[in-house]
Each structure stands twice: as C-alpha cells, then as structure tokens.
Amino acid sequence: MDAEATFLALALILLSARILGETAAWLKAPPVMGEMLAGILLGPSLLGIVELNDIIYTLAEIGLILLLFEVGLDTDLSKLSQQRYKASVVALGSFIAPFIGGFALSYWVFDLSLLVSMFIGGTLTATSIGVTVRVLRDLKRHQSPEAQVVVGAAVLDDILGIILLALLYEFATQGGVNLINTGKVILFILIFMAIAPILAKFIALSIGRFHHLSSIPGLIPTTIVSLILLFAWLAHAAGAPALLGGFAAGLALSRRFFLPFGAALRLPSNEDFCAKIHVSMQPIIQLFTPVFFVMVGLSLNLHEIDWTSPSIFLMAGLFITIAMLSKLTGAFLIRESLHFRWAVGLSMIPRAEVGLIFAELGRLSGVFNHEVYAVMVLTIAVTTVLPPFMLKWFYKQYGSKLDRRAF
C-alpha cells in the first residue's frame, strides 16, 4: 500500500471510529464497541475498503501500549489497602474461576489444544474497570462501599492479568514455558514495581524543573512518550510483551504507587505532575487507541467463518455463559449481604479493552484461528454491553437496600 492510500485508510479509520464510538456512547454502550464495529464495517467482513499493512499495525501497537499506559496511570494500589481482604478475595475468585472455566470448556468440551485453551481462559479473566466505574459514576455509586471493593479487586485483577499475559506470550513465542524464561518475565515485572516509586520521583523532579526552563512547548508529552516507548523496548528485550512496558510506565507515574517500601522511602505523590501528565497525554492516547480497536474489527473476516455450523453459536453461547457466571464467583466468596455481592459480581463482568488485548495477542501470535477469534470477540462484546444495563436495573430495584446496609 502506497503512502497516499495509507493516508486515506487512516482518515477513514479515525473518522469512522469517532462517529461510531460517539454513536455507541449515545446508546449507553461502551465506545470501544463502536470503534470495533468501525473496523468490521471498513474491513473484509463488509465493505473491504481498508487493508491492514505494516504502518497500521505499528500505529495500532502504539495505541495498545498507550492504552496499557493509561491503565497503569489510573491504577491506585492504595485502593487495595482500604478493602484489601474483600478486594483480594473477589479478585482471586474473579481471576481463577474464569480461567479454569474457560480452559476446561475449551480443552475438554471443544477439544482445543492446550495453548489455545490457556489463551481462552486468560481472555476470560479480564476485567474492564473503566466500563464499570463509568456506570457507577452515572448512578452516583462510585463512592459506595461496594464500589471500593470493585475498584480494589479490579486493580489486583489487572496486575494478575498482566502477569498471565506475559506468561502466555512466552508460551506462544517459545513453544512452552520453562522455569528460566518464566522467572525472567516475573523478575522483570517485580523489578519494574520495585523501581517505579524511585523512577516516578526522579521523573517528576526532572521534568518539573526543566518544564519551566524549556522555551519549546510540549516537553511533558515528548518525554513521557519517550519513556513509554523505552519501557516497551525494555519489556520486549526481557522477553515480555511490549505492552507490559506501557503498563509499567503508567504505574510508575500513577497518582498513588502504594507499596510498603515505597512508603518507607517517603516518596510523596505529586498530584500536580500527575494532573499535567493526564492533560498532556490524553490527546495522544485518544488519537492512537481507536486505531487498535478498529484494527480488531479489521482483523475479523466474518466470511471465513461457517455461520451455518451450529457449533459456532453453541461455542459462543457457552463461553458467554461461563464468562458471566465465573465472574460472579469471587463476589459470592465474601461475607456480605446478597445484594452487596450481586452488585460487586455484576461490576466485575465487563471485559472491553482488556479482553480485546488478550484476544488480539492470541490472534497475532497465531494461537487463535478466525473461528476462535470471532467467538472470543463476540463473547467480549456481549459481556461488555450487557452488564451496564444489568447494573442500572439492579440499582433501580435494590439500590435502597444497599443504602440501608449496616457497616
């Protein structure tokens, strides 16, 4: 594809993503669903007017890394300290149950390979806290006790998911997981978490000092993007997915990086600097991340799937059922009222961008074929779109009972 054709393709990608994303938001659905639909519309499934090439792939990967940076930047590990026991139980239950359920269904029912089954199980572990927080905020419940448990659980769930993603990536690229490489990946993650508070403090002081001296605008976005790409390169060099570097960079610069040794080092959070990062990076993140979600739709070729086969719908129906029920498991392990547990469980179901990251890595590594990939995308779409409506109905019916709950 020549440069001019790529310009046209990118224009179509960005405009269609914006229009359909706005439409999805207007319909009270997650905007990422509209952006993914834009890819299906432009790609081989329908119009076939946009073809994937190396430039679009690269921009989509940058969007993915920036997306994980934003996840890390918004991660507040101190949330775990507020409801740490309940949040930990919910997170572990909501992580283990979907993985085992997805793996068992894939491996023993549909007779898929070990690697494919592990990737499917990993995809079902995802939780998109962004979708849930948005709904809870609309309902004026984002400061409620159940919301604190959900946010804390989602933080831990994200961290476990990132580690699992790194291990599955190792499995896919190396043909197996050996102790040395596995240890290297885990060590890389631990090192990043260990140095993140020091690194964040150093960057805050350095950029804060030079920001006032710089006579050229754009110092913060330039240095932060450079840091993200550097961390992505380091992640790849260590044998982990590049997107892990984006998450680590965001975590290092998050508002509250809470670890015992971080507190011992007396590294205060710099709220002003974090606010400047948010403001400076948002336009860049909002420009690149839609390219990733559109690419998800472009990668789907619905014509290559045998829709006359009942196994497709049976597989999708079973995975959707497992995906929703298994996420309720963690909530029902805590000692709380029935309504409280239902509120937490429903809030943990949405997967959205986090699930799509797993599915896309499975496709790019050659683990998912078109059929399995389509089933996973359909599962993620349904489990992302339905829960917000379920939560709104639930709080309309039972919100008053939660308000009267004794502490």
Image (cartoon, helix red, strand yellow):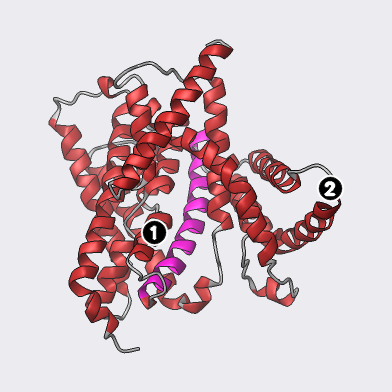
246 in magenta = no
Task: Identify the residue at horizontal 49%, vertical 24% (top origin).
Answer: 11
On residue 214, the disc is: 2
Horizontal side of 376 relative to 307 (left or right) equals right
Q: Splitting the image into 4 quarters, where does residue 98 fall?
A: bottom left
Residue at horizontal 28%, vertical 73%? 341
Q: Residue at x 44, y 24 (%)?
A: 12
Q: Mark 1: few, some, or many residues within 10 Å (few <14, many ≥20)?
A: some
Give the residue type that dot 2 points to. Answer: Ser
The amino acid type of the residue labelled 1 equals: Arg
Instruction: Determine if the magenta segment contains residue 149.
Output: yes
Q: Is residue 197 above or below residue 303?
A: below
Side (left or right) of 171 relative to 40: right
Q: Is residue 234 left or right of residue 299?
A: right
- State the residue position of label 1: 134
Mark 2 neighbour density, 10 Å: few (under 14) some (14–19) many (20 or more): few
Distance between mark 2 and mark 1 Cα atoms: 37 Å
The segment highlighted magenta reads 146-175
Q: Nearer the viewer, residue 355 or 406?
A: 406
Which mark is in front, 2 or 1? Answer: 2
- Position in image of residue 190 (x %, y %): 64, 58
The answer to whether one can see residue 252 in this image is: no
Q: Tell me how many marks there are.
A: 2
- Majority SS type along the magenta span: helix
